Amino acid sequence: MRADRLVATLLLMQTRGRVTAGELAEELEISVATARRDLEALSAAGVPVYPQPGRGGGWQLVGGARTDLSGLSAREARALFLLAGPAAAAAPEVKSALRKLMGALPGTFRADAEAAADAVVVDQTGWGERAKVRPPMVELLRDAVIARRQVRLTYAGRGRETSDRVVDPWGLVDKDDVWYLVAGTAKGRRTFRVDRIVAAAATEDAAERPSDLELAKVWEEVVEEVEKRRSPLTADVVLERRHLGVLRDRFGRHCELVAELPGDRVRVRVAAPAPIMIAQELAGWGALVEVEGPESVKAELARLGSELVTRYAR
């Protein structure tokens, strides 16, 4: 599109200061005649672009004039490059986009933006682990979400049995390197693990998406529902307040402060799928914690203690 070329031309001139029609043609992969017509169109439109004749001449913005096409403030530019900089190493498209945006920034912003882009490296691979590979299906689903196209997919359930369905893709979520597709179906909102999608193909049919949908809020609801299903059993535990942070690290969002008690102690409620799982987390605490209930967790703690005494007592 010509409008895209004209913007690209202006960005290039802002970055280099002066260009020839030949340099512009090579950079944008167009003919020299087309490049010259684009430069003349910018000048005719009132942009202060004028030719400089003679050896070493070319086209330039008169008086160093600049146009800030980004509309960003200095803080916004720095925040954007801090966020997108780490992604540029893995995605050539992001690197190219940042380079173009850099050219659109005012010169006073550019140094901080360049520094921000290189300030952070994200290494999502744990020590001793192999690098995780993004499921190839992610790109197909992402494109369908953006294009608002329905997707026909074959999905494997927990028992690996497969089923075919057509869904309205609403968005993708990367949760700790596990990808999920949030979609609308004939039975309402559903969430699919991308690594369980056996096959998928975008259709030509338009996908339906709620006009007020906010993917982040929808995902919060999904997480809340899943966590409730994963940890239906609760137990009340009493311990000194100074140990509360460690217990929260062990149980995460499944550790709730219930009451403040005398002697700088607290009562908390922890949750897990089964009594044995709570007991296994608490067994190593010994007398530092007191489990008030339920009896099923106490029984598991007693069993674990008895097994340890039997094996290690002298």
Image (spheres, rainbow, N blue to C red):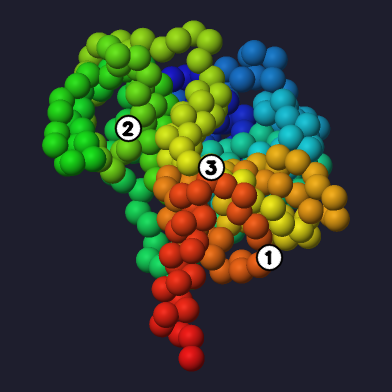
Residue type, numbered disc 2 = Phe
Query: Quick one: label 3, few (<14), some, or many (20+) residues within 10 Å?
Result: many
Q: Badge 3 is on which residue?
A: 234
Disc 2 to disc 3, how far (Cα)? Answer: 28 Å
Disc 1 to disc 3, how far (Cα)? Answer: 19 Å
- Which is closer to the viewer, label 2 or label 1? 1
Q: Is residue 54 visible?
A: no
Q: Badge 2 is on which residue?
A: 192
Q: Quadrant of residue 20?
A: top right
In which quadrant will I find the N terminus?
top left
Residue plotted at (46% across, 29% down): 225
Above or below for 267 versus 130? above
- Which is closer to the viewer, label 2 or label 3? 3
Residue 251 horizontal/vertical position (percent): 57, 51
Residue 93 horizontal/vertical position (percent): 45, 42
Residue 38 horizontal/vertical position (percent): 53, 23
SS of the residue at dot 1?
A: helix
Q: Nearer the viewer, residue 92 or 2?
A: 92
